[in-house]
Amino acid sequence: MPANLPPQYFETERKLKTAKTPQEKIIILEELLSLVPKHKGTEKLQALLKTKIAKLKSAAQKKPALAKHAPTFHIDKAGAGQIVLIGPPNVGKSMLIKSLSNANPEIADYPFTTRIPYPAMMKYENIQIQLIDTPPITPEYMEVWHSELIKEADGILFLLDLSSQNPPDIMRALLAKLNEKKIELIADERTIPSGVQFFYKKTLIVANKKDLPSGEENFNILKKVLESKFNLIPVSARRGDGLEYLKKRIFSLLHIIRVYSKIPGKKADLNDPYTLKKGSSVMTMARVVHKDFAQKLKYARIWSKNKYQGQKVNRNHILEDEDVIELHI
Ligand SMILES: Nc1nc2c(ncn2[C@@H]2O[C@H](COP(=O)(O)OP(=O)(O)OP(=O)(O)O)[C@@H](O)[C@H]2O)c(=O)[nH]1
Ligand SMILES: [Mg+2]
């Protein structure tokens, strides 16, 4: 019986030749398997594809965690914080980076377009936040450097594709994969549990491709399943929906505040904030401005959006976002 393979099968088969990692090959072979019409004439081909997938999967699992010459991709932090974008293949991670920054990463409609991490800077009001595009993660395989990158990040954006088959299942599988690497993603407002068992990482779920048919409907389904654990933000990286709101949420994910230093008698430079951890005091700011200031600090004057207009505060006063501070020594 003839196999009658669809033309799409042969197009996908061509991609197999350029696939470099076992992970890429598995995805392409699984795609091929889904394209094969299921009847007697294709039984041999189906079996062949399944064997190839099984072999690659078991080889990937046997691979030692740290190969002798494993590549490393540490990226130095820049700007007010470092956010790492992760997710399954083809969900639009690179397109989101492109839409949020001036970077120009490769974007394509096939999986594994991104092969190495790629840093970019996103402007948020008067600060810059570093975003890192990464290759996709699959339940089968994840590079050691990939988990290291996640462990070092100040926050995670986990992207899902609203037009894909079953985002909650994909997500569950990837969360389990991350757990294997001792990483636990948690909602941004949750307190980090004590104990050293896991690297807890504050995470926002970004549900992309809202512009595609049923995007909104699929988002509501996804939200119902995941909202007890995570905050979800619907966006279209391509059309731009939700991106301004996403930027605000990325800023809050970092748990930082911006404070401006002011010299007596002069205006503060509102384009040049110091970024400090939420909960920082006047003393922390003094230390960042200059170590002499910290030692000699007597008091500070504070101006804030709604509350203060030059009142004196002591060194333990807790600062809020956009406070203006005059340090007196
Ligand atoms: N309709 C629609 N398509 C999108 C959107 N974002 C990305 N895409 C498309 O989805 C495909 C994958 O986009 P990429 O940005 O390369 O996805 P990725 O997650 O970086 O993929 P990998 O690097 O392979 O993991 C491309 O064809 C994009 O044009 C979106 O918001 N809407
Ligand atoms: Mg990419």
Image: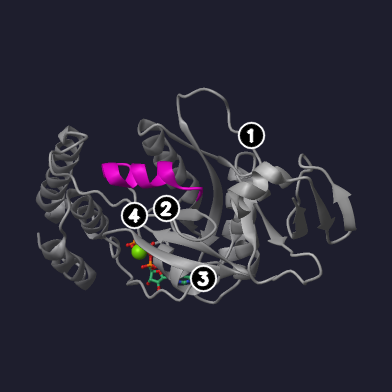
Residue at 41% from the left image edge and 74% from the top image edge: 103
The reply to whether discs 1 and 3 touch (Cβ–Cβ < 8 Å) is: no
Query: Residue drawn 50% across and 46% down?
Result: 168
**Which residue is under mark 3?**
100
Local crowd size for mark 1, using a 10 Å CA cut-off: few (<14), some (14–19), many (≥20): few
Q: Which residue matches tag 4?
A: 136
Residue 246: x, y in percent? 61, 62
Residue labelled with disc 2: 86
Is the residue marked 4 within 8 Å of ligand 1, measured from its CB? yes
The residue at which mark 1 appears reads as 191
The segment highlighted magenta reads 139-155
Q: Marks 2 and 1: CB-CB under 8 Å?
A: no
Amino acid type, callout 2: Ile
Instruction: Give the amino acid type for the residue marked by disc 1 in the picture.
Output: Thr
Q: Nearer the viewer, residue 308 or 246?
A: 308
Please tell me whether residue 235 is drawn above or below residue 317 in the rendered image: below
Badge 2: how crowded within 10 Å, few (<14), some, or many (20+)?
many
Queried whether the magenta region covers residue 28, the answer comes back as no
Cα separation between marks 3 and 2: 15 Å
SS assignment at label 4: loop
Q: Quadrant of ligand 2?
A: bottom left
User: What amino acid is labelled 4 in the image?
Assistant: Pro
Residue at the (55%, 58%) spot, across then down: 80
Q: Nearer the viewer, residue 296 or 210?
A: 296
- The question of residue 146 being in magenta is answered with yes
Point out the tag, 4 or 3, that comes first from the N-terminus: 3
Foreground mark, 2 or 1, reads: 1
